[in-house]
Amino acid sequence: MGVKSFIHTGPPLVLIAIVCATAFLFPGDAPFISDEPTLLAAANMENHQPCELLGISLPFTPARVGLAGTRGVNYGPLPIWIYQLLLAITHDPITLVRMHAILFSGSTAIALVWLARSMHLSPWFAVFSMFSPWLWMFSRELWDNTFCIPLAGIGVAAYCDFLITRRRWPLLLAAICLGAMTLVHLMSVALVAAVFIHFVIFERRWLCRFWWGLLLVGILWACAFLPYLKALLFLYQPRDGAGESPWNGWWHPLLGGQLLTAFHWLDVTRPHLPLVFAVCRIISLLPNLAAWSGMALIFIRGRSRARRRSLTPVDHFAVLSLMIAGCQSLFDGIERLDFQPHYYNATWIGYVILAWYAVDALYRRAWKPAITICLPLAAYVASVLIVMGISIIWIHINGGTRSIDYGTVLQDQMRAVARIEKFSPDSPTDVTYLQWQNLPWVKRDLIALLPPPPEPRPLRRLLIRYRNEYPDDARISVEDFPIWETAR
């Protein structure tokens, strides 16, 4: 890399590394609500069940299906497979958060840098995209559908590389990533459908050339996907009356840029700093405006260039992103899905392309780009960092939230379990701590991951509750009393 090239790309890449490193800030403050312990418990259980696979004896059993969704469908088993592998290395949930952050942030950053090179964008494209508070939180969350984010990024980046280079391996990598997404969550259908439609319409001539590789990938993932497909076809129950209006799902995808904003992110701190948060959150909505501008620009430019049959690879990226938004709208409209940030986890990369397509077009034509582009971007980054910084500190000080949206942080729940395991499992226990009252399996699954000490443990009466009456304090208190004394 030459000096000029380093000056151009070096600082952005260093900043990307710093942003990725922030995922390791207070890893014990990660949320641990309901699905996270269930996933780890399923992976831990399968790791302790030997099986025979193709005549080979294995000390573990690969999971067949994932978690049961809200629509009566068991999602794909890929997240449990990943957690099975990670649990073979360590049973410490905080270490698992660190490992998840490495996989998530590293692969997402690689996808964004790769995409920036393919679109001939500045590497700052990746930097600004990585500032998303939602990406930061999902990088630390031991959930299942968060795996859609890096898989979607790598898959679309690889497909866009294929559109430029016409090499075989990027196309096969895209097929593998998209196939893997179907083994994560049903929401991946929108992205997979968009890429497939684009390939059939614009690139079907390459199907004959690379048919054997694509066929092999398709067969492998079809075999792995079979139990999920069976559940999807025969057990699916549509949710009637979801949301306030049957039309919400159709326009909901227009808000796909939300994943790059600080809107609705950890609302617990907003009542305490209403003016600061109101201003910062309004400024952080700029990616939505950019994504809408990108949609309009792509529609206008695409129609004009299609007549002349002169679509460039970058135009193809843009058309693909518009197809992603369209398939998201079709999927959400049929499913009647309302706004939830994680509904964009599979298609987020399409909205990033839409936003940056508009920003890049404006930058190339603006009279003074430093004012018209750089100042709004700086304001956006500052607003996002203010909201994130205050919220992260708030969560760390209070040990999470009392709302089920985030809950008590992982580390404090682990401390409570460590305290409980100092006493006999036959100790009578009174639980007034709300999260474990509503989700009792969280304590059980944590105890399974963190085995008790081998020495004899005394029998005591336990009281598990919030440590005080302050409504913002989410930390847990575990008090013990003599067995004959009533917990108070």
Image: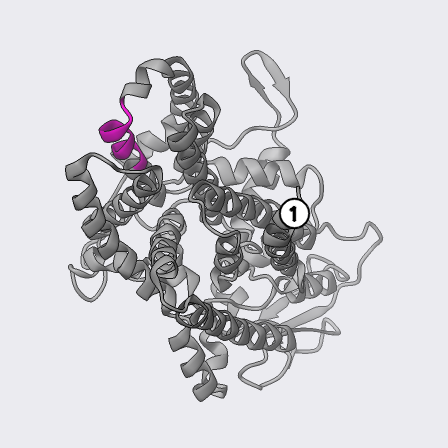
Q: As drawn, is 108 to the left or to the right of 196?
A: right
Residue 432 seen anywhere in this rendered image of the structure: no
Percent position (x, y) of residue 42? 54, 41
Circle 1 sits on which residue? 99
- Badge 1 crowding class, 10 Å Cα cut-off, few under 14, some 14 to 19, many 20 or more, is some
Percent position (x, y) of residue 359? 37, 59
Quadrant position of residue 422: bottom right
> SS for tag 1?
helix
Percent position (x, y) of residue 149? 46, 47
Q: Residue at x 21, y 45 (%)?
A: 302
Q: As drawn, is 380 to the left or to the right of 98?
A: left
Q: Which residue is drawn at 57% across and 28% down?
A: 61
Q: Residue at x 66, y 44 (%)?
A: 2
The majority secondary structure of the magenta stretch comes to helix
How many numbered tags mark residues here?
1
Image vertical order of residue 380 relative to residue 138, above or below: below
Q: In which quarter of the image is the N terminus?
A: top right
Q: Quadrant of the C terminus?
A: bottom right
**Residue type at mark 1?**
Met
Q: Nearer the viewer, residue 239 or 374?
A: 374
Q: Which of 115 and 372 is in front in this view?
A: 372
Quadrant position of residue 283: bottom left
Residue 388 seen anywhere in this rendered image of the structure: yes
Percent position (x, y) of residue 293? 27, 60
Q: Which of 115 and 28 is in front in this view?
A: 115
Quadrant position of residue 460: bottom right
Image vertical order of residue 236 relative to residue 279, above or below: above
Check residue 93 for magenta coloring.
no
Check residue 202 for magenta coloring.
yes
Q: As drawn, is 196 to the left or to the right of 247?
A: right
Magenta segment boundaries in residue numbering: 195-204
